[in-house]
Amino acid sequence: MIFYVFVNIQINEKYKHESYGVINYTHLILSQTFEDAERGIDTVFLADEAGNFYLYPNRFVADDYDPRERSWYMNSIENPDQIFWSDPYIDHGIGKNGFVTVVNR
């Protein structure tokens, strides 16, 4: 009986230790995956047919900016079922090279 209790305690402790290891490893992998995804998204830009647009992170955009005049916007209207990259450009709000990925939904 004493042997059974001792083995049972040992098995439960080992199971608990290994379970915590799996949970911690899963947490680490998921955290790293989400952090990598967040670093990969520099800007989110949504535009509608009225010329309104929403930009994240919020920053300066010229008052006369109209997304409907941009090639990526025109391409999205002409090809609503396609996903494509825009031509490269300089994003003056952040001073870096950029691309627009156009997704119509």
Image (cartoon, rainbow, N blue to C red):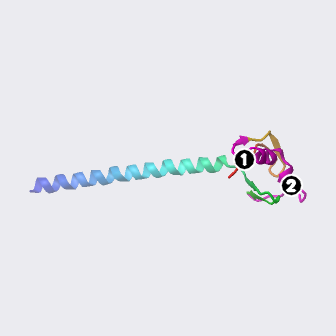
Q: Quadrant of residue 9?
A: bottom left
Which residue lies at the image location 43% right of the left edge and 52% below the top edge? 24
Count residues near mark 2 (Cα–Cα under 10 Å), then give few for <14, some for 14-19, many for 20+: some
Q: How many marks?
A: 2
Image coords of residue 59 (percent x, y): 79, 58
Q: Quadrant of residue 89?
A: top right
Which residue lies at the image location 81% right of the left edge and 47% below the top edge? 74
Q: Is residue 99 above or below residue 48?
A: above
Image coords of residue 69 (percent x, y): 86, 50
Answer with mark 1 or mark 2, whichever residue precedes in sequence: 2
Q: Quadrant of the N terminus?
A: bottom left
* Residue placed under numbered mark 1 in the picture: 80
Amino acid carrying label 1: it is Pro
Image coords of residue 38 (percent x, y): 63, 51
* Residue placed under numbered mark 2 in the picture: 66
Does the magenta-highlighted stretch encompass residue 25?
A: no
Provide the residue span drawn in magenta. Answer: 57-84
SS label for mark 2: loop
Q: Nearer the viewer, residue 90 or 5?
A: 90
Q: Which numbered disc, 1 or 2, marks the residue closer to the eye?
A: 1
Q: Nearer the viewer, residue 56 or 39?
A: 56
Amino acid carrying label 2: it is Asp
Q: Quadrant of residue 87?
A: top right
Does the magenta-highlighted stretch encompass residue 65?
A: yes
Residue placed furthest toward the top? 87
